[in-house]
Amino acid sequence: MVYGLKVEDRLEGASNFTSWKFKILVTLEESDLQFVEGKDQSDLEDQEEKLQFKKNVVKAKKIPIDSVKDHLMLIISKMSNARDMFRTLEGMYGINNTSRALALRQQLHQVKMAKGESVISFIMKISELRDQLSTIGDEVVDKDLVMLA
């Protein structure tokens, strides 16, 4: 666990990308590291500032490295900085594509309450799918959710 990220919070793929992205951005903000909108080392003149910049670059790289599952490590290990790591992962899993929306819609329509499952647990499953659709720009009307439930 680094910077407050738990092992179970590591990026697995598209299924948990949205929550992972939010956690990473908050972790970077908390650590005063902003690799997404960071400045270039060539903008710095003072040697002490350059040294601190280099330390921050390493810290920023460590956050995505420590927050992805092993199968994604090969992909980001080729990146020279944290900004590129983040953008590569965002390009892979943050894309709002039609096939992802269709798959989520299909899951939403096929979700069934398991024997012995609580109503709250079932509603949480439906809400989670609705939220995933919402994050990719496909809103589900409350009326549709009521009909599905």
Image (cartoon, grey):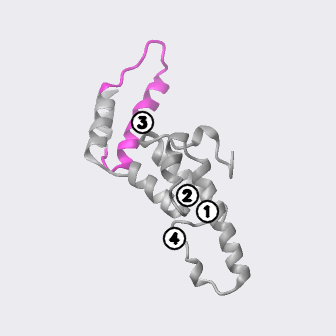
What amino acid is labelled 2 in the image? Leu
Q: Is residue 99 above or below residue 111?
A: below
Nearer to us: label 1 or label 4: 4
| Residue 99, picture quadrant | top left
- Residue range in magenta is 110-139
Residue that numbered label 4 is attached to: 37
Q: Is residue 138 above or below residue 102?
A: below
Structural distance between the alpha carbons of marks 4 and 2: 11 Å
Structural distance between the alpha carbons of marks 2 and 3: 24 Å
Q: Nearer the viewer, residue 28 or 53?
A: 53
What residue is shown at x 25% (from left), y 45% (from top)? 98
Neighbour class for label 2 at 10 Å: few (<14), some, many (≥20)? Answer: some
Residue that numbered label 3 is attached to: 127
* x and y percentages locating residue 104 in the rendered image: 33, 36
Neighbour class for label 3 at 10 Å: few (<14), some, many (≥20)? Answer: some
Instruction: Say whether marks 2 and 1 touch (CB < 8 Å).
Output: yes
Helix, strand or loop under label 4: loop
Tell me which numbered mark, 2 or 3, is placed earlier along the sequence.
2
* x and y percentages locating residue 63 in the rendered image: 61, 54
Tell me which numbered mark, 4 or 3, is placed earlier along the sequence.
4
Residue that numbered label 2 is attached to: 25
Instruction: Say whether marks 4 and 3 touch (CB < 8 Å).
Output: no
Q: Quadrant of the N terminus?
A: top right
Tell me which numbered mark, 1 or 4, is placed earlier along the sequence.
1
Structural distance between the alpha carbons of marks 1 and 3: 28 Å
Give the farthest residue toward the bottom. Answer: 45
Instruction: Say whether marks 4 and 2 touch (CB < 8 Å).
Output: no
What amino acid is labelled 4 in the image? Glu
Q: Main secondary structure of the magenta part?
A: helix
